[in-house]
Image: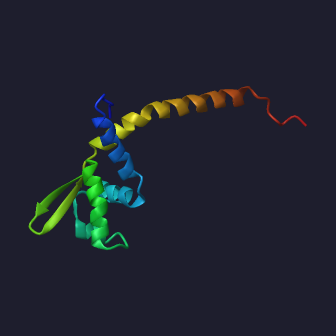
Amino acid sequence: MTTTGAGTDTAAEDRVFAALANATRREVLRLLRDGGPQSVQTLAEHFDMRRPSLSEHLKVLRDAGLVSEQRSGRQRIYRLEAAPLAEVQDWLHPYERFWRGRMKKLGELLDRMPDDDAT
């Protein structure tokens, strides 16, 4: 997820983050991660919504590059595409280091503080 002057990568990042912002779409990704490729019908069994609504969620995920679709006869099989998630992880990594550093400093401060056991 690098940013170029043209903004192309930024638009792709925005699509990925927008897709991940929805709980239903995150659950679809979890189902595909845990259960492997699945048909729309199989995925729909996990949700209390009409198939056209689920298809809209799948379209958002597909447009973000988070899932791929393969047709098998009349069925559409969806598969998790994890590469954009690795890019999100790369983007989040500096923040993880930031918070790890902050927590380490907090721990050091707490270690220097006297215990409240003296009464």
Rendered position, 110 above or below 56? above
On the rendered image, what quadrant is the C terminus found in?
Answer: top right
> As drawn, is 23 to the left or to the right of 34?
right
Is residue 89 visible to the viewer in this orientation of the structure? yes
Give whichever of 47, 3 is nearer the camera.
Answer: 3
Question: How far from the left and from the top, in percent, is residue 118?
Answer: 87, 34
> As drawn, is 6 to the left or to the right of 98?
left
Question: How far from the left and from the top, in percent, is residue 28?
Answer: 33, 59
Residue located at (31% from left, 34% from top): 7
Q: How is the structure coloured here? A: rainbow
On the rendered image, what quadrant is the N terminus found in?
Answer: top left
Q: Residue furthest front?
A: 6
Is residue 35 visible to the viewer in this orientation of the structure? no
Rendered position, 102 above or below 43? above
Give whichever of 37, 69 is nearer the camera.
Answer: 69
Rendered position, 85 above or below 22? above
Residue located at (56% from left, 28% from top): 101
Question: How far from the left and from the top, in percent, is residue 103?
Answer: 60, 33
Residue located at (28% from left, 59% from top): 58
Question: How far from the left and from the top, in percent, is residue 78?
Answer: 22, 58
Residue located at (35% from left, 72% from top): 49
Task: Examine the image and state in which quarter residue 71 appears.
Answer: bottom left
